[in-house]
Amino acid sequence: MDRARGFLDEAVETRSWEEQQAGLAARLREVVAHAYANAPAVKAKFDEAGVGPDDIRSIADLARVPVTPKAQLVELQQADPPFGGLLAVPLTEVSRVFRSPGPIYDPQGKGEGWGWEEALFAAGFRPGDVSINTFSYHMTPAGMMFDDALLNLGCPAVPTGVGDRETQLEIMQRAGVKGFVGMASFLLQIGEKARELGIDPRTDLSIASAFVTAEPLPDSLRAQVEDLFGCVLRQGYGTADCGCIAYECFHKGGMHVVRRAIVEIVDPTTGQPLPDGEIGEVVVTLFNRAYPLIRFGTGDLSAIDSGACACGRRSPKLRGWLGRADQLVKVKGMFVHPGQLQAALAGFEGVSRFRAVVTREGNRDRLTVKVELAGAGDEGLKAAMEARLREVLRIGAEVAWVAAGTLPEDGRVVEDARTWD
Ligand SMILES: [Zn+2]
């Protein structure tokens, strides 16, 4: 079986990018008209900017619409729950509602997917591959996103979530698992566990393709996992709100952008598109009818590379994740932002300042929340704060108590101290 070649939809994927863009512009006109007519928040944004739906005829015209940053989505939804006026279909047309940290509520329209099928195919997944999906199926959409994509591709999905590594190994052996979906660092941990148990991941398991996302992928980590399992590991880029935005093909060297959305790279301060090659914020316009996000600012930084790719796909590539445009930081695949910490620690007396510091040790993210306490603080109060932080952040965090006056006064609440080699 040739997992290194081929297309999910050859006729479309190999068409010139100009032709593909003409198709995108037609879909853009459709979705803008639909969103303006049905989503009050979209209409308000257009009206405020003095732009009408008929003004958006081409992809270039999109620059006239202001970017909606992720933080503004949180505010819109807080003011007008649950969807902030962004839902553009009746509730009877919604199949699922996801809740991600922020909080952000994302509706999924009936029959609407998240576009990961193409990404999985490019990573080498083929119909009939039994695949474990180690993303969480609860609240956040990742689990369901990939479950849908695997089923659509004809790959039986085993919904494991982040279960313990021994059980993952048992499933891999008994079910003859060929595909892995999840985080690269987790797959590495599974491989290390296998070795500990005397299982050789190359000969006793049959993982052929691994598709990873939700955290940066250093070359060293990719090489380690590919070598350990004797598999091909490819990554994709997407968000909880948008689904798949870009993905690697067999030839790597960046991630092909999808055609289910319009992906722009813009100056994060002005919202204006940047020339190919320049680093800017990834801004996405989704063609979903239920949830037509128009110029959604992901807060992620990347750049577009329009050079030709040996795979034959004609869409340009994103140069991968190049950092965050603001303080929103992804830790263990989940966003952590200042508002969460503020919400968690509000109401506790004696807290003067706090700061979350993200570090990375041995391919694992580590989050330490440093809290300045006036005085010694009693143990009961400290325990209550720790419990509250864990509850709000939903990822393991260590709490370090520091004396008042220790933290820098630069107003930063989340600090990303990770290095990616
Ligand atoms: Zn390619």
Image (cartoon, grey):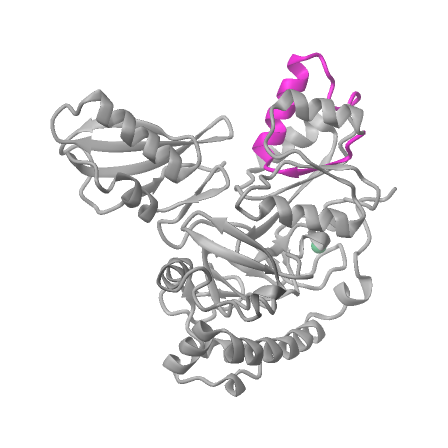
- Most extreme residue toward the left is 375
Question: Considering depth in this image, is 244 or 316 the residue closer to the camera?
Answer: 244
Residue 334: x and y in percent read: 47, 42
At x 53% / y 76%, what residue is drawn?
Answer: 38
Residue positioned 78% across, 34% down in the render: 178
Is residue 205 shown left or right of residue 104? right
Give the image location of residue 309, x and y in percent.
70, 57
Is 384 in the magenta?
no
Residue in the foreground of this view, choosing between 300 and 51: 51
Quadrant of the rendered image containing residue 59: bottom right
* Left or right: where 149 falls relative to 218: right
State which region is magenta: 176-204
Residue 255, given in percent of the width and then of the height, sits at 62, 53
- Report the front residue among 47 and 410: 47
Residue 189 magenta-drawn?
yes
The answer to whether residue 387 is seen in the rendering is: yes
Residue 369 occupies which quadrant of the picture?
Answer: top left
For image coordinates 50% across by 36% down, the residue present is 421
Q: Residue at x 71, y 50 (%)?
A: 149
On screen, residue 224 versus residue 150, left or right, reads left
Q: How far across and down, in percent of the image, does residue 376 sit?
A: 14, 23
Residue at the far front in the pictured view = 92
Residue 319 visible from this viewpoint: no
Query: On the rendered image, what quadrant is the N terminus found in?
Result: top right
